[in-house]
Amino acid sequence: MKCVRCRARAEVQLRAHNAAYCRPCFLFVFRRQVERAIDSERMFTQGERLLVAVSGGKDSLALWDVLADLGYDTTGLYVGLGIGVYSDVSHAKVVAFAERRGLPVRVVTLEDEGGGLAVPTVAGLTRRVPCSACGTMKRHWFDTAAVEGGFDVLVTGHNLDDEAARLLGNVLRWQSDHLARQRPVLPATHPRFVRKVKPLFLTSEYETAVYAFMCGIDYIVEECPNAAGATQLLYKDLLNRLEAASPGSKLAFVKEFQRTGQPAFAAAPRESPNDCERCGMPAYGTLCAYCRLVEEVGRKAAARAGAPA
Ligand code: Q46
Ligand code: ZN
């Protein structure tokens, strides 16, 4: 197999793109793909301050690596979720990467913030699926860190596989509100929000894994222990089977949704949020999702301790 750009021996085959590349050409094409996503979706410009949410996994670290190479002003954000060894190892990987590249990183540890509520405690007390509690908490701390740090943009490492799985989940239940918001760029719609972008939305998990491997990025290989039962994984598995039989399906699914489906959902009138009475974040009702969760935890913890709920 030969590289489609330079005819040298290819090291990577990308069936979705009907292409194969040698190492230097793959690295070039990978970076160019990220750059094109940033430019074509007008995600951000040089001079803006980017807060890059990093989990210690391959996607977010590969993205941070590319953004730093492209000369953007980046700061990493690591949110410690309190998930045992997984959190300890992922924290260490983020700190080591930031030190090696000489990049600033901000660490928010949930045990030390807002009442010391880590994901396992919250999930246990509220009997929620850990990923549901985790999602609400991560979103809250990402938004808070971005706004309080005076950043222009919050960048996340969601890749094509994540976006396709999320889209499939939203379509299966026709969640029109979620479909209207599933975009690679979410403008700052509230004073407590900054713009949110996903430069890897057309880049597959396989591509980021190859990039991280070729660049010698040391990332956490183990999945979060809560990922095993997550519905997202089931959707990913289904989509992988589809992709194997029909390469390019995921890319077409996400790309065409962005071109045709999403604008139709976004055009429908939607309720605009209030300000949360407690933290000022957008809320449907008096409290935002995070403050509702914290309140529920307080109630359940008190009930468990035998105090009146
Ligand atoms: S960290 Fe959190 Fe993921 Fe773990 S608890 Fe679920 S959502 S699986 S990206
Ligand atoms: Zn709130």
Image (tube, helix red, strand yellow):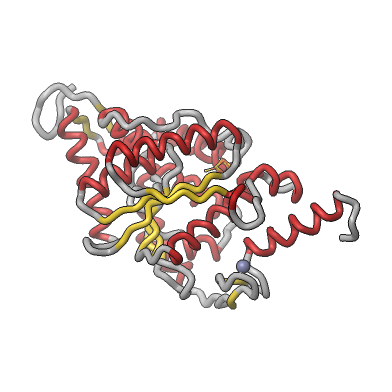
Give 129 or 281, whichever is nearer the viewer. 281
**Ligand 1 lies in which image quarter?**
top right
Give the image quarter of residue 37: bottom left
Would you place residue 38 above or below residue 225 in this image?
below
Q: In this orientation, which residue lies closer to the viewer: 284 or 179? A: 284
Which residue does the image show at 42% across and 51% down from the upper left?
A: 106
Residue 171 visible in the picture:
no
The one of 9 and 250 positioned closer to us in this rendering: 9
Which residue is most to the left?
6
Numbered circles on residues, count? 0
- Identify whether 106 is placed above or below 8: below
Task: Judge left or right: residue 92 versus residue 227.
Answer: left
Whether residue 23 is situated above or below residue 180 in the rendered picture: above
For the N terminus, give its image quadrant. top left
For this view, does 84 lie left or right of residue 161? right
Left or right of residue 96, residue 298 in this image? right
Q: Quadrant of residue 61?
A: top left
Q: Position of residue 78 (x, y in %)?
A: 46, 47
Residue lying at 53% horizontally and 57% vertically, measured from the top left: 141
Q: Position of residue 77 (x, y in %)?
A: 42, 50
Quick check: can you spot residue 308? yes
**Quarter holding residue 100:** top left
Where's residue 142, x and y in %? 48, 57
Residue, x 15% and y 24% (percent of image)?
Answer: 2
Which residue does the image show at 45% across and 42% down from the upper left? 55
Q: Could you say which is closer to the camera, residue 170 or residue 217?
A: 217
Quadrant where the image shows the C terminus: bottom right
The x, y position of residue 254, in whole percent, is 40, 51
